[in-house]
Image (cartoon, helix red, strand yellow):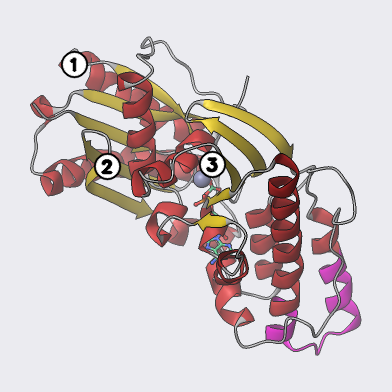
């Protein structure tokens, strides 16, 4: 008999619900983005996000079930993100998921959003299992992780300040690209010269596997102040090149030192065309990027992680599991 996992993701401003059959068959993956509601504020307003998750979630669940061709009574397992993320938004998806599990008397698994991103790769590439090195780059996080097996992680380095996606969003805002600005900045950068302006490559020469992007953003603030007429496409391309240089160099250095041949890049910034181009050009490593819709926040990756944790590791969570806004990948 088929095993159906209902996955729910509401850690930030995407209301997303997916249905997964067995391990990897994605029957639906509905993503309702609230970005348009937050754009005028230049970032996610937590209270606005929570209220809209409450409003939209039941409809998104219905759409995901309809598209999968199943009903509530077919669900075998419920999984939802319980952190890291914004506490209000997390609470909405988590409470909904727990209520469904309780009503159906089915098991429930709370999913770590960062581990969820790694499961975007699990969904798509069954033939490229761990061990691998994962670069998790999103709006909230930048992590270099040694994945020894699914469920077994060693965090090698994180960002000391801003995440890579956050840097894209902040610089994009300075360039008037709206919110979130990553994809728009990526498009603008294609018309510019990446060598036009030599921005700093933070922490590139350091031996540590940590990242730092706040200084780069400040460099751009000063550059714009001193060169108000600067070509915006050149500026976008030069900024992007600085971020990509650091991400690529550090990842390759870690892979070489640890003798890991397989590299997996996940999270919203994995959608970046220059990062993809640079890493996929590497001949000495096997590099994987999930398809675009699995890079940015989605519930399919959450469902896949929940199904794995339950069916392979035998886990489930009690229904008093609380949201953990600052949850780390490893305890
Ligand atoms: O993983 P995600 O959807 O949400 C978080 O968990 O944070 O990542 C969203 C981030 C945003 O900062 C967005 O600007 C960035 O991913 N992003 C991009 C691109 N597409 C999305 N950054 C650079 N280039 C892109 N093409
Ligand atoms: Zn994310």
Quarter location, residue 222: bottom right
Residue 271 point in image, percent of width and height: 51, 62
Residue 144 point in image, percent of width and height: 67, 42
The residue that mark 3 highlights is 46
**Left or right: 326 in relation to 18:** right
**Left or right: 253 in relation to 316:** right
Q: Nearer the viewer, mark 1 or mark 3?
A: 1
Residue stretch in magenta: 219-236
Q: Earlier in the sequence, mark 1 or mark 2?
A: 2
Residue 188 point in image, percent of width and height: 60, 81
Pointer 2: residues within 10 angstroms few (<14), some, or many (20+)? many
Quarter of the rendering occupied by the C terminus:
top right
Tag count? 3
Quarter of the rendering occupied by the N terminus:
top left
Does residue 237 show up? yes
The kind of secondary structure element at disc 1 is: helix
Quarter location, residue 216: bottom right
The residue that mark 2 highlights is 18
Pointer 1: residues within 10 angstroms few (<14), some, or many (20+)? few
On whether residue 89 falls in the magenta region, the answer is no
């Amino acid at each position: 008999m088929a095993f159906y996992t209902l996955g729910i993701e509401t850690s930030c401003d995407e209301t997303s619900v997916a249905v997964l059959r067995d391990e990897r068959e994605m029957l639906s993956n509905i993503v309702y983005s609230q970005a348009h509601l937050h754009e005028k504020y230049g970032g996610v307003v937590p209270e606005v996000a929570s209220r809209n998750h409450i409003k939209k979630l039941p409809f998104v669940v219905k759409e995901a079930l309809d598209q999968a061709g199943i009903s509530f009574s077919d669900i075998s397992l419920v999984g939802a993100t319980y952190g890291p993320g914004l506490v209000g938004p997390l609470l909405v998806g988590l409470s909904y998921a727990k209520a469904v599990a309780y009503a159906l008397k089915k098991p429930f698994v709370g999913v770590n959003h960062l581990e969820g991103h790694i499961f975007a790769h699990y969904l798509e590439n069954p033939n490229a299992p761990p061990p691998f090195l994962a670069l998790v780059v999103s709006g909230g996080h930048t992590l270099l992780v040694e994945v020894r097996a699914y469920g077994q992680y060693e965090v090698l380095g994180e960002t000391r300040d801003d995440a890579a996606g956050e840097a894209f969003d902040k610089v994009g805002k300075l360039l008037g690209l709206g919110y979130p600005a990553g994809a728009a900045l990526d498009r603008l950068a294609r018309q510019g010269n990446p060598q036009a302006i030599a921005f700093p490559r933070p922490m590139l020469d350091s031996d540590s596997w940590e990242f730092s992007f706040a200084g780069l953003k400040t460099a751009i603030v000063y550059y714009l102040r001193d060169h108000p007429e600067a070509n915006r496409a050149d500026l976008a391309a030069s900024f992007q090149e600085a971020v990509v240089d650091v991400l690529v160099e550090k990842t390759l250095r870690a892979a070489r030192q640890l003798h890991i041949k397989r590299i997996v890049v996940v999270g919203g910034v994995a959608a970046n065309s220059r990062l993809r181009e640079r890493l996929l050009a590497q001949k000495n490593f096997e590099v994987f990027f999930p398809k675009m819709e699995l890079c940015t926040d989605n519930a399919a990756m959450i469902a896949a992680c929940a199904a794995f944790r339950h069916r392979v590791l035998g886990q489930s969570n009690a229904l008093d599991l609380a949201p953990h806004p600052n949850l780390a990948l490893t305890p």
